[in-house]
Image (cartoon, helix red, strand yellow):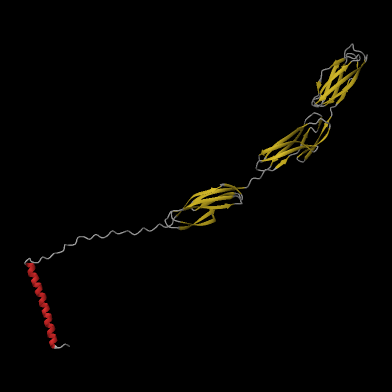
Amino acid sequence: MPKLPVVITLMKNNLFSILLIWTTVLVLGFAIGCGQVQMKVPPEPGPITPPPRTPPPAPQREAAFVTSGLSITPAVVYTGDKVNISVLVANTGELSGSHQVILAIDNGVSARQNIVLAGGTSQQVTFEISKDIPGTYAVSIDNLSGSFAVKIPPKPAAFSLGALTVSPAETYIGQNIAISTELSNTGDLAGDYEVVLKIDNKVVSTKQVKNLPGHDSLKLTFTVNKDIAGVYQVNVNNMSGTFTMQKLNFDIAAMTYVVAPGDNVTLAASTAPGAYCIITVYTTSGGSISVAPKTADANGFISWTFRTDKEIDAGFWWIAIDASFGGDSIRESTYFKIVY
């Protein structure tokens, strides 16, 4: 505790300070009242404008995927062939994202692909598939749908030859022989084929068949003739046959051998069908009588009938027959006798 003189001294000092403050206040107040001291009052503050505020950035849109442009090529294939199925996938959002593309065939999941796309980009997605069973298949990816068809592959061209025909099988030198067969394509596709004719193991003719449609046929005929008598061996693509060429003949079938003057003489014979025949009648005196020529019918039959003169000489009269057919010819003779 301070001593008393010290306390009195402190109290005197404080009192002095208080008196000094009040004296100063009174002097200032008097001066202001007399106008000797002017006080500047600061103006009232105006409205305060806050600084502009920058709005916060808008949030980026999430990834969103749109599928379009379904393509199925080819639309028709054969079993085992490839089909390409594609779509265009676009990310319409702003953020990157992943998407799973699912291919469904006949409502069943057939394949999947996972893709990642940046915002605003797109990508082509392609699936490659094949089917071994014929039919029509339904395709769907997201909200897109389509279809493709699978068919059995066509059979390639396959050829066969029908029975070999040789007609006529026997004929005369100079007459044509027709050698025929039928070519058939038992496949589905068109094709080419070669048919070769051999006679006595020598190639004499070839036929090139071009682009014969599937399940179609074509008759093929070779025409040949020979100028030498004999039997000929025919071969067409390993099918065999024969034909015979014979020399021209003239065989008398009926004849009037003894006649009286003024009677008819008849001569009938067989020869090659179509053979051209001329007969000449020679008299006993060395003269001759012409008789109109004739052509043998389709069976090779030919005949003449002519009348003798009433003033004719008795004796033997000779008849010369000249027959020709194709490249062959023959001369035969006969006679008749005039009696009184």
Q: Which of 26 and 208 is in front in this view?
A: 26
Let me know if residue 106 appears in the view: no
Rendered view: 135 above or below 287: below
Q: How many marks?
A: 0
Please tell me in which quadrant of the rendered image residue 284 appears.
top right
Residue at image coords 53%, 54%: 104
Q: Where is residue 107 in the image (x, y as percent from the top left)?
A: 53, 54
Q: Where is residue 313 in the image (x, y as percent from the top left)?
A: 91, 13
Q: Nearer the viewer, residue 335 or 59?
A: 59
Of all residues, the one furthest to the left in this rendering is 34
Of all residues, the one furthest to the top in this rendering is 311
Q: Is residue 96 left or right of residue 32?
A: right
- Quadrant in the picture for the C terminus: top right
Q: Nearer the viewer, residue 106 or 34?
A: 34
Q: In this view, does 48 lie to the left or right of 207?
A: left
Rendered view: 280 above or below 27: above
- Quadrant in the picture for the N terminus: bottom left
Let me know if residue 11 appears in the view: yes
Q: Is residue 117 left or right of residue 333?
A: left
Q: In this view, does 321 lie to the left or right of 58?
A: right
Q: Nearer the viewer, residue 119 or 172?
A: 119
Q: Position of residue 142 (x, y in %)?
A: 49, 53
Please tell me in which quadrant of the rendered image residue 285 appears.
top right
Q: Position of residue 173 (x, y in %)?
A: 81, 29
